[in-house]
Image (tube, grey):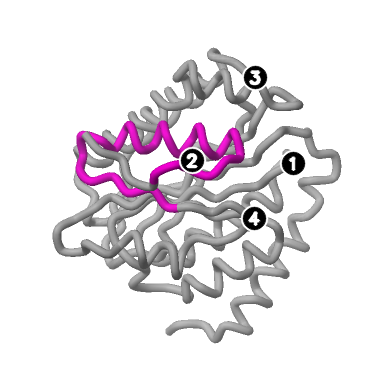
Amino acid sequence: MTKPPLLMMFVFCAALVATGAARADPKPVDLELAFVVDASGSIDEEETRLQRQGYADALINPHVLNAIARGYLQSIAVAYIEFAADGCERLSVPWTRIHDGASARAFGDRVLAQPREYCPGGNAIGDAIAFAHGSIETNTFEGTRRVIDVSGDGPNTIGRPVTLARDLAVASGITINGLVIERPSMPDLDEYFKSAVTGGPRSFVIKAENRRVFAAAILKKLIIEIAGQMPVSSQARK
């Protein structure tokens, strides 16, 4: 049974209060960035590997490392969260400070080493955003900016309303960006993400037309997020 929106808000706020002590002495960083990655049944083994490899490769790219080094604190904090149906979101790789090539590579290696967990039943994007929101609020870092980075190949189909989760996160000062994996059956998914999933200052959606350009789309999005700039184009091509 789906919980009423007011009850979900109460449960979410209570969880933040209960775990608020985790941020008693937070470590300052330029950016807190949660990678929220689709691991539902529509994402096969190859796509799972491509997604993980794309994030691992992007973090050690010289352009990304240079963007981190240009920050005031020269460091960011990242976490890798995978989601599927409601109740299936998980913190695959916990919050980690990235400040150089070695720390970026170590994080990427941990992403690649994660076992794949199957949880069929739909796309609970709203639950995933709420999970990432709570994780940002209760981690041990304090970012100048806070971003949730959602990638997926379909709309929210189960769990809490995605717009409610989006609005709660944005109201707390978090920006939500999107990376859409285009499928022929959903040609307007990027427009759905723009209207229902993303929000906050300088939010944007990038569309990957196919698997070949997925890694390039991740790299482009990551550089934009670290630099805090709007993209010139929202579509990655081969």
User: What residue sits 45% from the left and 19% below the top?
Assistant: 61
Q: Tell me: residue 8, above or below residue 23.
A: below
Residue position for label 1: 144
Residue position for label 2: 80
Indicate the quadrant containing the N terminus: top left, top right, bottom left or bottom right.
bottom left
Q: Amino acid at mark 4?
A: Ile
Q: Tell me: residue 139, above or below residue 111.
A: below
Q: Residues within 10 Å of mark 3 (few under 14, many from 20)?
A: some
If you read the primary sequence from the N terminus, does the residue marked by circle 3 or circle 1 appear first? 3
Q: Where residue 193 sits in the image (x, y, percent)? A: 40, 62
Nearer to us of marks 2 and 3 is: 3
Which residues make up the magenta segment?
A: 205-233
Q: Nearer the viewer, residue 121 or 179?
A: 179
Mark 4 touches mark 1? (CB < 8 Å): no
Mark 2 touches mark 1? (CB < 8 Å): no
Q: Amino acid at mark 1?
A: Thr
Q: Tell me: residue 35, above or below residue 124.
A: above
Residue position for label 3: 69
Q: In the structure shown, which secondary structural element does the residue marked by tag 3 occupy?
A: helix
How far apart marks 3 and 1 lie (CA) works out to 15 Å
Q: Residues within 10 Å of mark 4 (few under 14, many from 20)?
A: many
How far apart marks 2 and 3 lie (CA) works out to 21 Å
Q: In the structure shown, which secondary structural element does the residue marked by tag 1 occupy?
A: strand
How far apart marks 3 and 4 lie (CA) works out to 22 Å
User: What residue sits 61% from the left and 24% below the top?
Assistant: 68
